[in-house]
Image: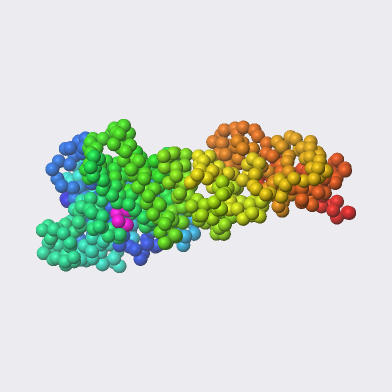
């Protein structure tokens, strides 16, 4: 691929963004042992560029003409350079400034958002993101990119050049061929990449799945070194090094795990390994192939509603879009992959995709596939993987309880919880585990909402359950209260929030009939407390929940809990006012003391402290914490004096 530098235009110098400089520095120092990956990144970009050109050519066929889209890798031993060229879409001057000088593109931006400033941690982090174009500087002391956008005239080529030290230069050039050529002047210690056999091996290792031919020019043809393991008919065309066949079009049985992993890295721009994947071809009325991956690390924009999501859509192998959102529901937005439809028109527009009933049918089939895949993952011997999935994407999956009523049961089966039966920090109890552990006649699945797993474990609400050995699920994700509203039952058992309503556990001590005198006393006490606290609580009652604690707060059945209040507050809405109920434990000495307190002021003081403590035990904020401290201090001093 030829180009001529125009003598007239002199280069202009630009500085990299500070963040880019930082990134370059880190990359060169931390990826030293993996430095061969630069080639994969450059070929991956070339392939993306060819895909994008083919897409633009759907509307403007003249852009491609009759040239074959291909990628070329060339070595010049004398000059010490390695070149990767493509005849893809190319870049305009503006695009090159934006894409290669700033951190505009997603991978780098995400990486930089997460830098900690700690060299060692940051070096590990780098492995989790697509490293991209800048990886060229791991092996090169100078990189030269010449490019011309396919829809621009030959004189609007542009030459970008940098030593990766902080600046780059730009110059207008005449470039006869469209597309991009990246030339690396290899560092002295990177001369291994001037060996043709080595490069061929690397292309096969990392870029076999690229759908375009990757060719090697130069002395390649007669050499044949490293060609012996070429499995298909490539030998007919000795120039083409890779298989040049879209990976998803190959039969599942013929694709190695390594190849799936490399392909994932290419499409997801993610350096880490996926947890698992599912590759399927559907034939018959609708023909399509899907290859869907579950990543092992959540992208940092998972919660950003505006950020792009979706799968890569191809129609008859022609790339259409990177982010087709119509094929999976929002709660599965972490899934990465490819869908290749045989039946869609090549000129599909967004509207057409949205309205096509075939797409709706594919969406529900793909959704089931992903849920099945997760189901299988959850049953694997190696429970680490599912634990990782749950940690990264569990909260996202829970959204499905609201979003996808038709798959609610499947989703429920995939949920994992902390519980009074589990000890670790990581949620590992499933609803199936819960039911297996519960006596057959237990009607409900009990759960508790709290701010954190720790707060949940020490909640007074659990006392009656602990005593009876009834398992309680402990929920502390910020969306749990909201999500649980959508879960009415699982396998015929209903869900009960233990922090709400009256508790009707069998054989509870407090519910046993008490003698009439005692009953009268309790009623009197309840009334007295209510009088003092009427502004702050709805009802005061004798608890059937408590064993060790003096008091606790209980919500009415349909009141909003604290999580929902927080969610509303965060979205700028006013939560409807409602007061909790205070339940007291008459067998607690403090309540006994309260009952015997004749002095009304001291009675009020004690009652208030008991309510404040119940609030604190729930992890709530007190309206006036300083007043609480004063009251407790008064009580402490009194205790001292007596
Ligand atoms: P990513 O591929 O994850 O977007 P890269 O650092 O690899 O990140 O590339 C940055 C951007 O530079 C790409 O998104 C693309 O817009 C542009 N680019 C890189 N190489 C090429 C190329 N060969 N042809 C056209 N554009 C390219
Ligand atoms: Mg890239």
Q: Is residue 405 above or below residue 551?
A: above
- Way the structure is coloured: rainbow
Where residue 405 sits, quadrant-wise, is top left
Tell me residue 472's x, y (percent). Answer: 58, 51
Q: Which residue is at the front of the view, 163 or 107?
A: 107
Q: Is residue 610 visible?
A: no
The tally of labels here is: 0
Residue 378 within the segment the image draws in magenta: no
Tell me residue 292's x, y (percent). Answer: 33, 49
Q: Which residue is at a point 11% across and 64% down the rendered structure image?
A: 222
Q: Is residue 291 left or right of residue 565?
A: left
Tell me residue 528's x, y (percent). Answer: 80, 38
Where residue 563 sits, quadrant-wise, is top right
Tell me residue 321's x, y (percent). Answer: 29, 41
Q: Which residue is at a point 65% across and 44% down the rendered structure image?
A: 503
Q: In terms of secondary structure, what is the magenta stretch mainly?
A: helix
Q: Which residue is at a point 50% across and 39% down the rendered structure image?
A: 486
Q: Is residue 401 visible?
A: yes
What are the residue bounds of the magenta stretch? 260-264
Q: Which residue is at a point 72% across and 53% down the rendered structure image?
A: 548
Q: Which residue is at the front of the view, 126 or 559?
A: 559
Q: Quadrant of the C terminus?
A: bottom right
Q: Is residue 571 left or right of residue 519?
A: left
Q: Is residue 572 left or right of residue 303?
A: right
Q: Which residue is at the front of the view, 128 or 167?
A: 128
Q: Is residue 72 above or below residue 502?
A: below
């Amino acid at each position: 691929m030829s180009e001529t530098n125009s003598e007239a235009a002199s280069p202009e110098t630009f500085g990299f963004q500070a963040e880019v400089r930082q990134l370059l520095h880190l990359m060169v120092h931390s990826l030293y042992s993996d430095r061969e990956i630069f080639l994969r990144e450059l070929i991956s970009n070339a392939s993306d560029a060819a895909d994008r050109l083919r897409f633009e050519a759907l509307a403007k066929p003249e852009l491609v003409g009759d040239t074959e889209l291909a990628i070329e890798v060339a070595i010049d031993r004398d000059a010490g350079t390695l070149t990767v060229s493509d005849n893809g879409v190319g870049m305009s001057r503006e695009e090159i400034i934006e894409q290669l000088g700033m951190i505009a593109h997603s991978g780098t931006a995400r990486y930089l958002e997460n830098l900690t400033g700690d060299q060692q941690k940051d070096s590990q982090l780098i492995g989790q993101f697509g490293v991209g174009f800048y990886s060229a500087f791991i092996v090169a002391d100078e990189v030269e990119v010449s490019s011309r956008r396919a829809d621009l005239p030959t004189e609007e080529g542009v030459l970008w050049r940098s030593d990766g030290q902080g600046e780059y230069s730009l110059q207008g050039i005449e470039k006869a061929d469209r597309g991009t050529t990246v030339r690396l002047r290899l560092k002295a210690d990177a001369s291994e990449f001037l060996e043709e056999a080595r490069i061929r091996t690397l292309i096969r290792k990392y870029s076999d799945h690229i759908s375009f031919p990757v060719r090697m020019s130069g002395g390649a043809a007669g050499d044949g070194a490293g060609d012996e393991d070429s499995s298909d008919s490539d030998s007919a065309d000795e120039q083409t090094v890779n298989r040049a066949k879209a990976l998803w079009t190959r039969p599942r049985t013929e694709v190695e795990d390594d190849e799936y992993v490399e392909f994932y890295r290419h499409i997801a721009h993610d350096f880490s390994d996926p947890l698992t994947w599912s590759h399927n071809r559907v034939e018959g009325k609708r023909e399509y192939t899907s290859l869907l991956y579950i990543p092992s690390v959540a992208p940092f924009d998972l919660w950003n509603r505006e950020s792009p999501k979706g799968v890569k859509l191809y129609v008859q192998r022609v790339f259409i879009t990177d982010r087709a959102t119509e094929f999976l529901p929002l709660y599965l937005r972490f899934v990465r992959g490819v869908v290749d439809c045989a039946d869609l028109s090549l000129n599909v527009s967004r509207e057409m995709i949205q309205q096509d009933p075939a797409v709706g049918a594919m969406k529900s089939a793909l959704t089931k596939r992903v849920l099945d895949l997760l189901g299988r993952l959850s049953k694997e011997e190696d429970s680490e993987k599912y634990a990782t999935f749950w940690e990264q994407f569990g909260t996202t999956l829970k959204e499905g309880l609201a979003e996808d009523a038709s798959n609610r049961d499947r989703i429920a089966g995939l949920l994992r919880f902390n519980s009074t039966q589990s000890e670790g920090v990581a949620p590992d109890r499933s609803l199936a585990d819960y039911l297996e552990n519960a006596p057959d006649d237990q009607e409900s699945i009990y759960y508790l909402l709290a701010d954190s797993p720790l707060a949940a474990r020490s909640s007074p609400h659990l006392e009656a359950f602990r005593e009876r050995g009834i398992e309680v699920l402990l929920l502390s994700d910020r969306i749990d209260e909201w999500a649980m509203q959508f879960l009415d039952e699982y396998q015929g058992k209903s869900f009960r929030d233990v922090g709400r309503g009256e508790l009707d556990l069998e054989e509870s001590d407090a519910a046993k009939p008490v003698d009439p005198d005692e009953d009268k006393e309790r009623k009197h006490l309840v009334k007295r407390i209510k009088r003092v606290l009427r502004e702050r609580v709805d009802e005061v009652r004798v608890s059937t929940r408590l064993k060790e604690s003096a008091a606790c707060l209980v919500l009415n059945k349909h009141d909003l809990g604290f999580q929902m209040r927080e969610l509303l507050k965060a979205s700028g809405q006013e939560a409807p006012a409602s007061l909790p109920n205070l339940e007291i434990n008459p067998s607690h000495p403090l309540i006994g003391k309260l009952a015997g307190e004749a002095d009304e002021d001291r009675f009020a003081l004690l009652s208030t402290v008991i309510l404040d403590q119940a609030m604190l035990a729930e992890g709530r904020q007190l309206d006036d914490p300083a007043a609480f401290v004063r009251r407790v201090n008064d009580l402490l001093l009194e205790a001292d004096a007596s």
